[in-house]
Amino acid sequence: MFKSLKVRWAITAAVTLVSLYCLVPTLVPELPSNIGKFVVTDKIRLGLDLQGGMHMILEVDADKALETMMERTADDLKESLMDNKVRFRRLAKAQDATITLELTEAEGKAALEKILKEHHPELEIASSTVREGGQFVTLIYNEKRAADLKKLTVEHSVETIRNRIDQFGVTEPEIIPEGNDRIMVQLPGIKDPERAKNLIGKTAMLEFKIVDEEHSLDEALRGNIPEGSIIAYGSRDDGSGARGKVPYLLKNKTLLTGASLETAKVQISDRFGEPHVSIKFNSQGAADFDRITNENVRKRLAIVLDGVVHSAPVIQERISGGQAQITGNFTMEEARDLAIVLRAGALPAPVNILEETTVGPSLGSDSIRQGVIAALIGFVLVIIFMAIYYRLSGLVADSVLILNIIVLLGILAGFKATLTLPGIAGIVLVIGMAVDANVLIFERVREELRIGKTPSAAIDAGYGKAFITILDANITTLIAALFLFAFGTGPIKGFALTLSIGIVVSMFTAIFVTRAIFDYFLWNKGIKKISI
Amino acid sequence: MEIIKPGTNFDFVGKIKITTGISVALIIISILSVVMHKGLNLGIEFAGGTVIQIKFSQTAAPDDIRKTFSEINIEDAIIQEIGKDEVIVRTNHPADKEFQTAVSEAMTGQFGEGNFEIRKIEFVGPKVGADLRNKAILAIILSCLGMLIYIAFRFEFRYGLGGVLALVHDTIVTIGALSLLNKEFTLAVVAALLTIIGYSINDTIVVFDRIRENRKKDLRTKLAEVINASINETLSRTVLTSLTVILVLVVLFFLGGPVIHDFSFALLVGVIVGTYSSIFIASPLVLFFDRPKLPKGKGKK
C-alpha cells in the first residue's frame, strides 16, 4: 500500500499514540488536573455487570391510556349529545376501549354522525344495529389516532421517568425507548434498587375528590354503592405502628389532578417534626382549588394518590393561596420520593416491569478480577506459543498482538463504548483469533520459502496471497458479529463489539504493521534469512 | 517448529462416506438428546423467572437453602452451586417487592444477618422471554443466510451451500452437546453459537480460498484432487489457529468465572466441531453439489 517505510512507521506510531492517549484516564486513576484538562476521554465505561447497578425493561401499558381516554371521551360525548338534544340511553364505555349507546329515535344516527364529525373526529362508528325505534351503536377510537396516542403515551412516559431519575440523582443513567411500548432503564452503581424501582414504577396519579357524606359508608360496603360514588381505601396509623386499611366513600368526579401542580417539596411540620409534602398549584390550579374549597366548606376533601386515600381533611374555609399539604406518616425518604414523583408528573399510563437485573458491586469486582486474570493468562500462553512456533517472526506477531489490545481498548475508551463481562471474554477470544492473520501469512511465507524463493520474495508473495483470504474470512466473522450486535442485549452487545473491533484492528496490526517490521529488517538491515 | 509437516496428503474427500456418517450420527444424537430432555433447558432470559445469586460467608447446605425457600412457599426453587460458598437459586416466581423482602427475611432467619450477600437478582417476565427466543432464532437464521449470500457472491453458490450446511451442522452439534450435559441454554449460549458461526465459516473460507486459487492455476485437475490438495495445504494453519483459540477458551473456561462458564464451554465445543466440519464437511460437500449433472437435452434452451 505505502512504499515508504517512514510513512508506514508514522501511521503506526500515530495510531499507537492516539490509543494510548485515549487510555490515559483508564491507566492513571488520579490524574493531576493540569494534565487532566488536556485529556478528552473518560475511563473505559464499565457495564452494569462489572460495576453493579440495575437494569430494567419496562412496558408501558398504553392500552390503559387509551381506556382512560375513552372514559373521558364517553363523558364528553354524553354532554355533546345532551347539548344537541339527541335522545339516547345507556351510553357507557364498554370493553376493549369502545363506547356503546342506544339511540332512541330513528333520526338519531344522522345526528350522532354530525356530532362525531364536529366534536369527536377521533371516534368512528364500528357497528350499528337497528332496534325498535332506534339503534344500538358501538363506537371505537380511530385506529391511526389510537396509534398516535399510544406512541405519545410511551414518549411521555420516557420523559417522566427521565425527570424522576434526574431528580433522584443517578450518574449516567440510560433511559432508552425500545420497540413499540418498552423502555430500557439502566442505573449504574445504584445503592438502593428497591427505592429506585418504587420511584420509577409509581404512576403518581394525584387526584382530589370530595368525600361522599350524604350516603352511608356501611351501606356502600355491603355492596350498595350509590351512583357516582366509589369506595377507596386509605391507610391509617392506629398508633401501634401497623397501618390499617380504612375505607372511604368518595364522589367519583375528580375535581383536580396532579397536572395542576407547579411544584412539590418536603417540609417538616413544626409541631411533630414529621415530614410532609407541601404542594403548590399553578395559577389555573390555584383558581380551581380556590373555587372548589369555597364550594365545599365543611366537607372533607380526599387526597388520592394512585387510588389510595392519603388523607381526607375537612375543608375549614376557602383556601386561596394555591397551597396544600399531603400528610400521612411518611418517613423522610418516602416524603422525598413522593415530592419527586409529584414534581416530575404522573405517568400517563401504568408501567410493568418485564425484566430486571440487579447486580451488587462485589459481584462486579469479582467478575473483573476473573476476567482480567483469564485474559492475561490466555495472552501469555498465546505469546509463548507463537514465539516457540514461529521463533523471531512469532515475536513480531506477539508485539502486534499487544498493539492490537492497546488499540482495541483505546477505541473502547475513545468512543465511550461499554465494556461488559462478555466483552472481556470477547477480548480474550480476539487474542486467540487475532494471531490467525499472522498464522495465515507465516504459513504462506513458509510455503514460498520451501519452493526456494528469497526471503524478500517470499514475504511479498506470502502477504499478497494471504491478504484476500484474511479479508474474506474476517468479513464473514464480522457478518456474524453484526447480527449478534443487532440481536443481543447489553452485555452481549459488548461481546459483539469487542470481537468486531478486535478483528478489524487485527487487519491493521497483523498485516500492515508486521509487514512494516519485516520490510524494515529486509530493506534496512539487509537480513538474508527469516527466522520463521 | 511444525505440528503438521508440509507435504501431507490425506485423502479427505475419499473419506466423505465415513465423515458424513459420523456427522449424521452426531446430528441424530443431538436431536435425540433434545427430544429426550423434552426440549432445551432454557435459561430465564428465554423461559422467564427469577434467578438469585447468593454468596455465603461459610458453606451453606443446599438443603438448608431449599428449606428456606419452601418456608416462603417457593417450592420450585432449583439450587445450583457455583464456585465456593456461592449458589444460584432459580424459581418461576416473579421477583416483585414482596418476594425480595420475603427472601431476605427468610434468609436472615435461617443463616443470620451478615452471613450471606445477595449479589444479583435477575427477573425476566414471560413475555420478554418469548420475544427473545424468536429474536435469537431469527439472528441465527439471518447470519447463516448472510454467510450464504456473501460466499455465493465471492465464490460460487455451491460453496455457499457447502459452507452454510457445515454451519448448520456445527450449530446443531453444539446445541446437542449442551443438551447432553443438560447445560442451561442462555442468552450467552446464543452469543456463543453466533460466534461459532463466524469462526467456523472463517476456517472454511480459508480452504475455499485455496481451492479457488488452485483451480485458477490448473483447470484440468479434477475438483476432488484440487479440494484434497487445498485442505492439505491449509491444514497446518487450520490446526494452528484452532489451537490458539482453544488455548484461550480453555483458560476462559477454567478461570473466567461462573458467569461465562457455559459461554466458554459452548464456544469450546463449537470451535472443535467447527474445525472438524471445515476440514471434513464443507469442502467435500462442494464436490457433492458439483456432481449431479443435468440429463442430456434438458440443459439446453
Image: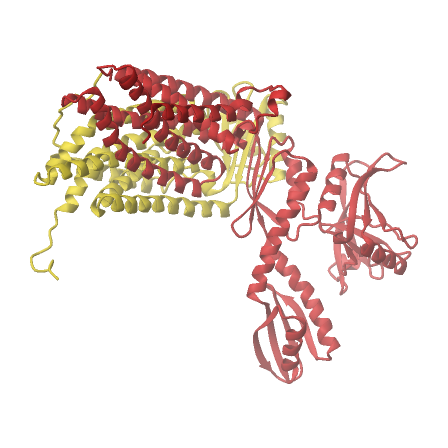
Chain colours: A red, B yellow
Q: Residue at x 48, y 20 (%)?
A: B84
The front one of B81 and A4 is: A4
The answer to whether A328 appears left or right of A354 in the picture is right
Residue at image point 29% right, 25% down: A438
Residue B126 shown left or right of residue A342 in the figure: left
* Looking at the image, residue B3 lies above or below residue A127: above
Pick the front one: A515 or B126: A515
**Viewed as shown, does residue B242 lie left or right of B218?**
right
Quarter holding residue A36: top right
- Quarter of the image with the N terminus of chain A in it: top left
The percent coordinates of residue B63 (x first, y second) are 50, 26
**Percent coordinates x, y for residue A523 in the rendering:** 28, 19
Taking the spot 64% from the left edge, 75% from the top edge, the residue there is A117
Quarter of the image where one finds residue B110 = top right
Nearer to us in this view, B49 or A448? A448
Give coordinates of residue A291: x percent, y percent.
87, 59
Q: Is residue A19 above or below residue A356?
A: above
**Count of numbered marks:** 0
- Whole-percent x, y for residue A29 in the image: 58, 20
Q: Quadrant of the C terminus of chain A?
A: top left
Q: Is residue B239 visible?
A: yes
Query: From this viewpoint, which residue is outermost toward the right?
Result: A317
**Quarter-wise, where is residue B275 in the image?**
top left
Q: Is residue A88 above or below residue B63?
A: below
Is residue A96 at all visible to an observer of this figure? no
Residue, x 66% and y 40% (percent of image)? A165
